[in-house]
Image (cartoon, grey):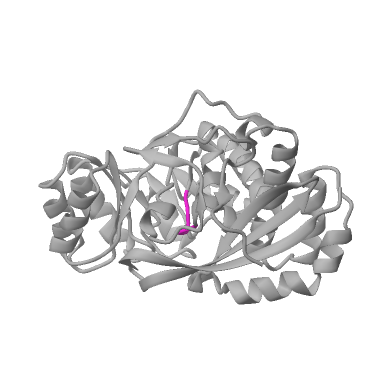
Amino acid sequence: MKTKLQLHLNTLQLKHTFTISRGSRDAVDSLIVALKAKDVTGFGEATANPYYHSTTQQMADRILAIKSSIEQLEWVNPLEFSRWVEKEFADQPFIQCALNNASFDLKSRIEGKTLRNYLGFSEDKKPLSNYTIGLDTIDRMIAKIKEQPWPIYKIKLGTNDDMNIIRALRKETSSLFRIDANCAWTAAETIERSIELKDLGVEFIEQPMPANQWEQMKAIKNKSALPIIADESCCTLEDVAKCQDAFHGINIKLMKCGGIPYALQMIQEARKFGLQVMMGCMTESSIGISTIAQFSGTLDYIDLDGAMLIKNDPAHGIKLKSGEIIYSNTAGIGAQLFKQKN
């Protein structure tokens, strides 16, 4: 199968300034890849992320440099396509993700199946998605919770006032909390804080320490009162085995691992080691979010709020109702751009 390639560059404007321990942003650049064959179009997305040294313009330039090769490529299934993509973009997992996801979306649409059905996933299990509250003043974080009532919140931390933040937010809601420190804590802080956080209704702590502090993470795994979930420490398949002694679970990001085929391998590997599995977003539009949602039947936890955090979503797809995933009935990922742009 040969395809036609189009790229769509967008700047996603955030509803609120989004702050984590590493910095703040008001917008996120997005690259959407469209692969078309047989009058059907499949979509994949990658967004810019300074922590991983990615920009959408660099990604677009790399793809356009071999656009003719991509369009001349004959492939039968997405796995065959992904092997070719990996050779061409071995150092660019974000590019791999956008292209690979578009190929899976295209193939499942051509076959008239939802992507989750094409991949053989169960639809009986749909964990609720959390809604993220970025770092801010306590008053503003409380206001965000009141603005968006939700059964599960992911709270971003990484300040000298972290425990006071959680104590204050707990007074405002009985919803379940998940904590994400984005590498900002020490081992001692993680252990000590986990005890009170458990009493404050926190479900787990995500990536409390810097990604490369493996020995320290191993030392605290069994001392923490709460499960510890890897994010920055678990980017690729090779990282999963290292996580078995240092974390209770992993958070898979499609962009970091290279997209659908590699996420499938990571899930299988994580289950082999008895790790819990979460899949999260990186502030994508409804294209990226609808792709992640297809994995829900294989996951323990899911984070799908990315499209809810932006005010100019270029696409429509899955919806969230009080954390519950509402799928589109259309084939593929069930998402479509509002307006095609060259």
User: Measured from the top left, where is residue 72 in percent x and y?
Assistant: 89, 60
The one nearer the camera, 155 or 229, is: 155
Residue furthest top in the image: 124
In the rendered image of this protein, does residue 42 appear above or below residue 282? Answer: above
Q: Is residue 329 magenta?
A: no
- The secondary structure making up most of the magenta span is loop
User: Measured from the top left, where is residue 148 in percent x and y?
Assistant: 25, 48
Residue shown at 71% from the left, 63% from the top? 6
Q: Quadrant of residue 110?
A: top right
Residue shown at 60% from the left, 30% from the top? 121
The one nearer the camera, 109 or 155, is: 109
Q: Residue 252, can we see it?
A: no
User: Measured from the top left, where is residue 195 in percent x and y?
Assistant: 21, 46
In the rendered image of this protein, does residue 342 appear above or below residue 170? Answer: below
User: Measured from the top left, where is residue 282 in percent x and y?
Assistant: 47, 58
Residue shown at 20% from the left, 59% from the top? 141
Q: Residue 248, can we see it?
A: yes
Residue shown at 33% from the left, 60% from the top? 181
Quadrant where the C terminus lies? Answer: bottom right
Q: Which residues are magenta?
A: 280-284
Q: Is residue 224 left or right of residue 88?
A: left
In the rendered image of this protein, does residue 299 appear above or below residue 212? Answer: above
